[in-house]
Image: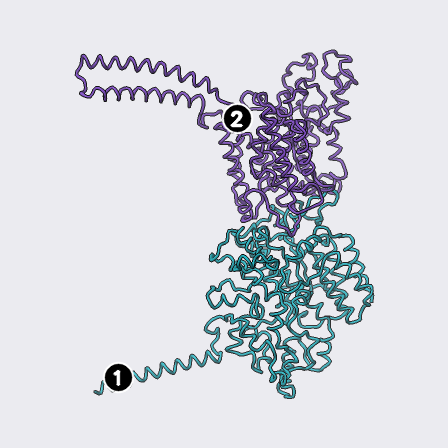
Amino acid sequence: MGWNWHGIGQRIYKSSYDVRKAIGKEAIIVRKLESCCIVHRNQWLHRLWSVIGVYLVLASSVISYAQETIISPATELNLSQPDWGIGAIFKTATVVRGAASCAASSCHGGPRPAVSTPSALRGSEYPIWLESDPHAASWRTLASEQSQQILTKLGIIRNGAIAKPREYDNCLACHNTNRELSTDKLTPLIAEGVGCESCHGPSQPWYAWHYQLNGSLIEGMTEIKPLVQRAKLCVACHVGSADRDMNHDIIAAGHPALYFDMSVYHDRYPKHWRDPMMSTPDYRARLWLAGQVAMADAELELTSARASKTHAVSVWPELSLYRCTDCHVALNGALHLPSGDSREIIVSGRANPRTWNLRGIESLAFHLESRAALLLIEESKNLQELLRDKASDATKIIEVTALLRQLLAAQFYPGGDRDVVGWNRQKLRSLSRTQLAKPEVGQDWESAAQFYVGAWASGAQSESKQLSEAMHTMRRALVFPNDKQSPSFPRAAKTNHPPNLEEWRSALKQAAVGLLESDSQ
Amino acid sequence: MKILSILNLARSFVGLAFCGLAIFVVASTARGDTPGLSASPTVIGVKECAACHSAPSPIYEQLEVTSFIRLTEASEWLQNDKHAQAYELIRLDLTEEELNSVDRISNQRSRDICQKLGWSKGDGNFEKQCLTCHAGLDHRTTLDANTSSLLRFGVQCEACHGPGSIYTRIENHQQTTWREKTPLEKSELGMLDLASPSVAAKVCWSCHLGNIEQHRFVTHPMYAAGHPPLPPVDLQVFQDAMPPHWKELKDKPLSSHVHAKSPTTFAKQQEYYQARFGIVSATDADYQSWRDSYDRTRRSMLGSIAANDVGIQLIHDAAERPELWGDFAIYDCTGCHHELSKSKPRWRPLDRTPGRAYPAMWWSLEYDSKSSEQKPTSSTLSQEVLSAFDRVPFGDRRELVASSSAHADALRVRHQARQSMEQKPMTESEVRDWLVHLLESRREMLGDYWTAKQTAWMFQVAVRELVDHQAISDNPSLNKLDELSKELNLSFRIEPRTSVLVNLEERLEKSRTFDERSCLLLFEELAKIVATK
């Protein structure tokens, strides 16, 4: 959102022309007055004061005009929570029919597109989903041996029966989004994972007539073409929401921690649609941005819900708000220095808040430099301070997260995903470059992985030989070792697990050079 | 004139009265009659102790004093005991040259710790937080020229034996009547009864585990800044590692005492043994039974039970202080500091809520002497305490204050019966039972390295004593002990004047990589050997 400097300059010049004309006229009036009236002895002083007065009036009007349109105080921004148009499928007042109801072979269950309905975009959505989509397997995952162990450890399942229905609903909310067990009397439990209606919306309002509309917007069906809308749908499960809290207790019971990125996940997703934008070179970068916006919003909503303890599984303090690797590092004799200002952290002996979902927005706000963006950074820092302070007031955290969500919406929401459209991979690359300038990037796994993913989304690995080698080295450093769910990165000591911190740092330098070069092209 | 003379008389009376009072006061304090004594006992420093306790003078050898006391304690201690170097290894006032030498790795580390924690010279932090353990400093002491010079010798005599100003200057322990006093009387005069394992353990664990009231507590910021993690404790193993500067019971002659020939003193000796061991008659057979008893195992067991008391006290004291509460050092280190593994699930007893921090469980051991079988019970933290830790991450502070003090009270009642263990020798069957039930009660907790290490140390002491008494054969039990020792890295001895930092990494490596299953197998095999008579 750069300002139209040229336009502003022109406007000022134009208005100054009027001013200059007016001053000229004013001088004539003064002289006329002098000639016919009793005037002050010091005519020059008189003229000077009147000219200054005129200029002051004009200057203040210019400034107030600029303030109104360009820099507005926060209270004047539209800070109401926008309606993104996406609801949680989980709690719905309509009957959910399940994916199988979309699966007629002449509708969405066919072998190939346009067999019976020439206008159908794909026609084989259901088989693609059933066979390749991990979302179809999410119910099977919940029913697996490992999940049963998790459920048992949490006390949700006892002696083969569900002992804690509201907490079981928390699992269903992501793994089988069709029905809330404890309250929904309409829909029977459908043994399928995340199906069609989880993303496209409950079908009851539109299933009877949607086939007549030939691909135009169907009222009641979730609008998921705009990328930010799409990402918001994903993060409802992959980050969390007020109804979906995958917290540290559940992670400790055995559930993998959540690390979402829209560009990566979207890239790997077996697509049951034809996306005309897919082949554009900036698509990944735009997905990355859409993801960051959605991830931040979801994280803030989830943090607020956790602090309010409205969910059955909420505990406070919630440990998954902190960086995993700050605690989960095996004790070793060599000093393990945490990142950031190590002295401050050591004095408190505390962990850093986890910024996986918020870091992109912070970096972006640095990049954009508008006033709302600056406020965003300030409040973001405030939130991290609050989280670090053990005795922090949950009420304060709720306030700060609400404010942050409003600022986020003000920054990115107006006009839907307009900003995603204006974004491209060059901008993402220059953002990555500014991130590189920060010393804390690369001191811990999270910041390093965030950087890597951002660079990947900007297409760095296929840009030049230098960059792709650097990316390859970085990737090897970041991958978890076999059998571990925690990284070995960074390793200060010499180790034969490749690569170590020195190699990572040289790869970073190489990447910096490569990004600079690609920028200049 | 008359008045003058009367006045003079009056003056002289007053003067005399004053003198008399002064003499009386001085005399009575010198005799020690005045209860409470004018001031609390103060530390006098190892130099004074060393005047007698560095080498026995011929007169003491003549009087056979050396039959029950070595009188070489100070010199042995200075040379070999790690406590003597506790201050030297962390002192800050070294020059840059000295710091760079390899031997000074611990001094460099203590400097780093102070710097990271923002402690500067003269703000008292180093003294109050480090020297309370590393120099046995009482936290109320103000450091002046006199006391600063005492620091040089680290944890000195009086840090464990009790401040010596009374029992050296007022009621002198060199007198022959000293030996006739009961341990309780000696305690009141300042000398702690370190022959009692429970008393000794409380003293040892006040540093080696922690005591918040005495400002002896390694906080989590200190660990994060570089303080090495504290190992689990076993009284006998630790005492062996010092090495001991005292005679063990079995090394003392049967009826040793000063002036052995005198029947009066012999009678008083009887009283001593009565008070100490509850032995009614004074026959040699009774003393023999003590000397043949399993004193080392008894010491190890009583020391572990004392560790339990100290541990629960730590929780209580930390919960009582809002400014200290939330310090992560109260909790089990490996509860957080473990790598996340896919296939090897994190060990945890099944009935605990996942994702919560619990206090360290290696010290959780109780000798429930109410039950006739007298077996130790596991997870001795009461249900109330555990649920207070369960309810919210890191525990509900207020609930913990109440539940931990209730638990400590209950333990105190139960452990009153422990007095009987203090007063009777441990027999072979008791040792066998102890080991078998120890394993049974701790089987589920042996996935934790600290617990496994402490259990292994207890096994080591008991099994070796059984072998020494020839109750079991040395092969294969000693072999199994060796394997266990290798797997858990039980080795303790490091050279004097060497810091623990030198091989800390190796030691900690086992905490990450030890094979729980093979350790459990070894424990079971040892228990089997021990159980069969």
Residue A512 vs residue B154, the one in the foreground: A512
* Residue behind mark 2: A411
Tell me, by letter, which chain the rendering colours purple.
Answer: A
Name the one closer to the observer, B109 or B477. B109
Neighbours of disc 2 within 10 Å: few (<14), some (14-19), many (20+): many
The answer to whether B456 is drawn above or below residue B391 in the figure is below
Residue A96 in view here:
yes
Q: What color was chain B assigned in the picture?
A: cyan
Query: Is residue B180 placed above or below B132 in the rendered structure?
Result: below
2 vs 1, front mark: 2
Cα separation between marks 2 and 1: 100 Å
Percent x, y of residue B414? 65, 63
A245 left or right of A43? right
Give the structural element (helix, strand or loop) at label 1: helix
Who is closer to the viewer here, A342 or A250? A342
Label 1: which residue?
B7
Can residue A232 be seen? no
**Quadrant in the rendering for residue A82:** top right
